[in-house]
Image (cartoon, helix red, strand yellow):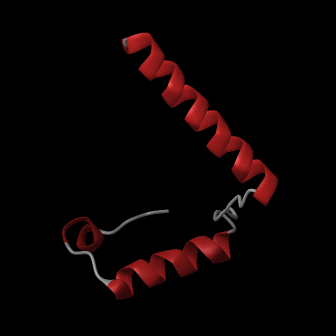
Amino acid sequence: MKTGDKERYQKTDALDSKNLSNQLKAGVLKGIYIPTEAQEQFMTLARHGTQITKKLRQT
């Protein structure tokens, strides 16, 4: 989306909402991904496994 000179140096809620509205009209906005509970639990388990591995390698 084109941005004007005013948007480069001054950021306001009005400019932000106008920009979002234009992007929505143009169809460039994408939806967000929300993981399921099972996927979230798996990612948490994987993060903990990575942390444990790092701690074990430090000792």
Residue 10: x %, y % from top left: 21, 74
One can see residue 36 in this view: no
Q: How many marks?
A: 0
Give me the residue at 50% from left, 62% from top.
Answer: 1
Residue 32: x %, y % from top left: 67, 62
Give me the residue at 44% from left, 11% from top.
Answer: 57
Residue 6: x %, y % from top left: 24, 74
One can see residue 33 in this view: yes
- Please indicate whether residue 33 sits to the left or right of residue 7 in the image: right
Above or below, 19 against 50 in this view is: below
Above or below, 50 against 45 in this view is: above
Q: Quadrant of residue 26?
A: bottom right
Q: Nearer the viewer, residue 2 or 49?
A: 49
- Please indicate whether residue 20 sits to the left or right of residue 12 in the image: right
Residue sitting at the far left: 9
The C terminus: image quadrant: top left
Give me the residue at 80% from left, 52% from top.
Answer: 38
Q: Nearer the viewer, residue 51 or 18?
A: 51
Residue 40: x %, y % from top left: 70, 52
Residue sitting at the far front: 59
- Please indicate whether residue 42 sits to the left or right of residue 22 in the image: right
Give me the residue at 56% from left, 81% from top.
Answer: 21
Q: Nearer the viewer, residue 45 or 4?
A: 45
Residue sitting at the far bottom: 14
- Please indicate whether residue 5 sits to the left or right of residue 16 in the image: left
